Image (cartoon, rainbow, N blue to C red):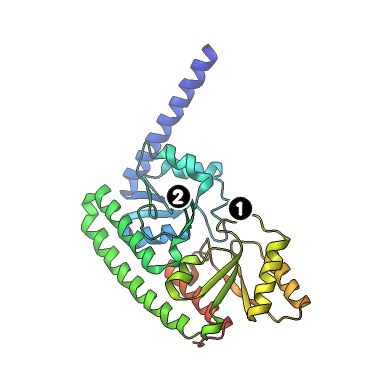
Amino acid sequence: MKHATLVVALLAGLISLMSCERTAQRTENGRLRILATTGMVADMIQQIVGDSATVEALMHAGVDPHLYKASQGDLRKILDADYLFYNGVHLEGKLASILQKQARVKPVIAVGDSLQNLIAIGDNVYDPHIWFDVLLWKQATAHAAVQLATLDSVNSDYYQANAHTYMRQLDSLDAWIHRRIGSIPPNQRILITAHDAFSYFGRAYGIKVRGLQGISTLSEFGLQDVSNLVDFIVTHQIPAVFVESSVSDRSLKAVLAGVHQRGGRVQIGGNLFSDAMGAPDTPEGTYIGMVKYNVNTIVKALGGDTI
């Protein structure tokens, strides 16, 4: 009993110490500490808050959010943050319990859970890859801006102004994508990737999509899946398939081998950013830069206009 009491006291002291330390850090720089799960969400929040807050992404370039588990260092970042923003729609499945617990003590906001017109993949289960429809991502941005303006009313006008500027950029990006994808010959507008992350992209921009694995990289693929995709590529004379930066290329290499055995001609069209952005301080390390890179890679490999 004494041992249990001591443990409780130590835990209480640790939490108190961490709270004091966090308050001291906040007071020292006078800025909010905002933690986002993915790079896409972090970039969105950074565009809204500008220099009024410190924004950090929990998951870095090349990290698969479907498989991500928080380390001890990550848990400390989660505890230290003033606000937590995440994609939602069950993208960060392995973080769900942590986010739920943190929601009891601080603002924890899913940018995607308020969206309409999501792609259903089962009963009350939806495709989480919402960022590949730029106008849907614009809606998520508007939702995040309202939440931030409510939480930090002192900077409300600043946040809303930044959000409106960014959303105009997203409108321009959306129009640009339509023009670029429209340059691909209609019979070649078929996008094949390692996992089914691009359904929103296909719906928004008029290109058929197909993935070897399912919506989540947690899903397994079998020999029949490989055989079916090989048949599809040979039948439709697909010129290129695409690997992904956060997913192993092993599965698609098996598909390519199968196509070549059948006498078909297909190549790797490029490496797309799907569930994670590029490295910081690169064009692909921003949402808009990532989307432009992906679109240009797809258009070039599928016979569209070169830039």
Q: Nearer the viewer, mark 1 or mark 2?
A: 2
The picture places residue 55, in percent across and down from the top left corner, at 40, 55
Whether residue 282 appears in this view of the structure is: no
Q: Which residue is mark 1?
A: 218
The picture places residue 26, in percent across and down from the top left corner, at 34, 44
| SS for callout 2 | loop
Work out whether 279 lies above or below 70: below
| SS for callout 1 | loop
Viewer-closest of 187 and 77: 187
Q: Which residue is mark 2?
A: 124
Query: Is 141 on the left or on the right of 292, as rendered?
Result: left
Which callout, 1 or 2, points at the residue further toward the start of the chain? 2
Residue type at the position of mark 2: Asn
Residue contact between numbered discs 1 and 2, judged by CB atoms under 8 Å: no
Classify 10 Å Cα crowding around label 2: few (below 14), some (14-19), many (20 and above).
Answer: few
Question: For residue 215, which quarter of the picture?
Answer: bottom right
Work out whether 305 lies above or below 252: below
Residue drawn at the location 45% of the way across and 83% of the way down: 182
Viewer-closest of 291 and 240: 240
